[in-house]
Image (cartoon, helix red, strand yellow):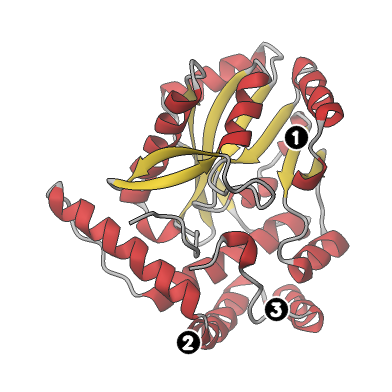
Amino acid sequence: MAGWYQMHERGAGYWRMEFLWWVYRVFGIRVLKFFVCIISVFIAIFASEGRKASKQYKHLLNAYEMEHKRKVSHFSAISHICAFACAVVDKMSAICDKKPKIKFDINNDVYWKSLQQILSQGQGVFFMCSHFGNIEALCAIPDAADKKMHAFMNVGQNPIFRRFINQHANYINTVIHPTESIDVAMAGDIYDALEKGELVMMAGDRKSPNTPDKIIKSKLLNTDCSLPAGVFRFARACDHKVFAIANVNVGFEKYRVFVKQIDTKNLQKMATEYTAFLQNLILQYPKQWFNFFDFFES
């Protein structure tokens, strides 16, 4: 299967995106999701690579569930892709609508309380997100602009969707940095931002297209996988608290935020704790895994 950076947008087009935005603005998110689910079924039929990745993931998930005597998850590759399409709609609503319909709650555990204490002290935090759940929907959280957020994205991927977002985005106090522009000067700027109590977010589950051989090996669902070494090194070098974070759909237009502090003693420990965080959530919300590419090395 292809790497994530070799995958192309399917069913996207500038006027199609504008039409969907019009449907959302006139008829609301429920009508748009119904419409998008129908479209995504036809897209999924021709998305052989995406279906193959979904089936591989489900096979590994089911094997893990049976081995550990857990309830076995049942869903098709097409319904999995439809769930992703609905997540894209929520993303659009969160980023582009001044009054998004999405609601949130917090997994209020010891890690969240620790994060609150760190933020209340004016410290910066490095967040390691993933393509599990819908991290971009965090933009819809009320008063999300209390702290400045520096988010890194690969701007060369999904150009049509990126163009739409750039045209309609309602980002508040969020700065998007291209991952392609990371250099020594940028690293210094990010360290300074953390020192000022600002936040940084990077995805830890996708290898760099420029250096795909620089990886950290870890395990997810008892299967080998490769994580981007550069992201983990960058997080560790910033010398601030590091948290894994995920924003998971738990119902129609409802999301729950999960965090876990990551021990930065060494890169391997960071990778192990990061994948453990993902695995725990995968077992609770299996259809929220949106890595439709060759992630596992089975």
Which of these two is toward me, 144 or 57? 57
- Residue at (73%, 52%) from the top-left corner? 154
Which circle's residue, 3 or 2, is located before the other in the chain?
A: 3
Q: Position of residue 270 (x, y in %)?
A: 47, 27
Which of these two is toward me, 215 or 190? 215
Q: Is residue 97 visible?
A: no
Secondary structure under the numbered disc 3 in the rendered image: loop
Query: Mark 1 or mark 3: which is in front?
Result: 3
Image disc number at residue 12: 3
Quadrant of res 72:
bottom left
**On screen, residue 56 above or below 192:** below
Q: Amino acid at mark 2?
A: Ile
- Residue at (32%, 71%) from the top-left corner? 75
Q: Amino acid at mark 1?
A: Met
Give yes or no for contact between labels 2 and 1 (Cβ–Cβ under 8 Å): no
Q: Amino acid at mark 3?
A: Ala
Give yes or no for contact between labels 3 and 2 (Cβ–Cβ under 8 Å): no
Say whether residue 256 is left or right of residue 77: right
Which circle's residue, 2 or 1, is located before the other in the chain?
A: 2
Measure how far apart labels 1 and 3 are at the Cα level. 28 Å
**On screen, residue 27 above or below 200:** below
Q: Position of residue 3 (x, y in %)?
A: 56, 61
Which circle's residue, 1 or 3, is located before the other in the chain?
A: 3
- Are there few (<14), some (14-19), or many (20+) residues within 10 Å of tag 3? few
- Residue at (40%, 68%) from the top-left corner? 54
Q: Position of residue 197 (x, y in %)?
A: 75, 19
Say whether residue 234 is left or right of residue 275: right
Residue named by callout 1: 149
Residue named by callout 2: 45
**On screen, residue 177 above or below 53:** above
Say whether residue 61 is left or right of residue 37: left
